[in-house]
Image (cartoon, rainbow, N blue to C red):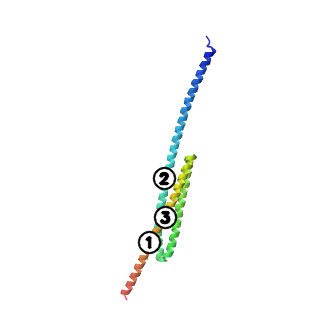
Amino acid sequence: MLPSPQAHASRVTEQVIHLGALWWSSSCSSSSSSSSSSNSSNSSSSRVVVVVVVALIIVVVVVVVVVVVVVVVVVVVVIVVVAAVVEIVVAIKVVVVIVVVAVVVAVVVVVVVIIVIVMVVVVVVGGVEGVVVVVVVVVAAAVVVVVVVVVVVVVVLVVVVVVVVVVVVVVVVVVILKIWWAMFNV
C-alpha cells in the first residue's frame, strides 16, 4: 500500500530536522575550531612580537655600550694629545663635538630600531592589539633614548673631568720638578 500523505509529510519533516541538527552541530564545531585557531595565531603572533622586541632592545643596549666605550676612548686620547700639543680649552671643545656626534648616532640608531619594531608589530599583529603594542613600544623606546643620551653625556663628562684633573696634576708636577731641578742645578 502507498503511504498516506500525513505519514510522508512526517517522514520528510523528520529528515529535515535531522539534517538541520547535523548542520548545526557541524557549524558549531567549525566555529569553535576557527576560534581556537585564531586564538593560537594570536598567541603565536604575540610571541613573535615579544621575541622581536627583546632582540631589538638587546641590539639597542649593545649599541649604547659600544658608543659609550668608543666615546670614552676617543675623549681620553683627544684630551691627552690635544692638551699636550695645543691647550686644554681646545681639547674641551673637541670633546664637546665628539659627545654631540655620539649622542646623535645613538639617537638615530634607537629611532631606526623603533621604526623596525613598529613595522614588525603592524605586520604581525595588526588591529587594535597592534596599535596598543606600537604605543607601548614607542613609549619604551623614547625612555631608552632619554637613558642613552643621559648615560652618554654623564659618562663622557665624568671622563672629561677625570682626564682634565689628571692632566692638570701632571702639568703641575712637571712644572714643580722643573723648578726644583733648576734650583738645585744652578
Which residue lies at the image location 53% right of the left edge and 52% below the top edge? 136
SS for tag 1?
Answer: helix
3D distance between C-alphas at marks 2 and 1: 36 Å
Q: Position of residue 21 (x, y in %)?
A: 56, 26
**Left or right of residue 59: residue 127:** right
Kind of residue indicated by mark 3: Val
Q: Residue furthest left?
A: 184
Q: Nearer the viewer, residue 30 or 85?
A: 30
SS for tag 2?
Answer: helix
The local crowd at label 1, few if under 14, some if 14 to 19, many if 20 or more residues have their Cα within 10 Å, is some
Q: Residue furthest top?
A: 1
Residue underneath mark 3: 152
Residue underneath mark 1: 163
Residue 126 in view of the camera? no
Q: First in sequence: mark 1 or mark 3?
A: 3
Residue underneath mark 2: 55
Residue 15 in view of the camera? yes
3D distance between C-alphas at marks 1 and 3: 16 Å
SS for tag 3?
Answer: helix
Q: Nearer the viewer, residue 80 or 143?
A: 143
Q: Residue furthest right?
A: 5
Kind of residue indicated by mark 1: Val
Q: Position of residue 159 (x, y in %)?
A: 45, 69
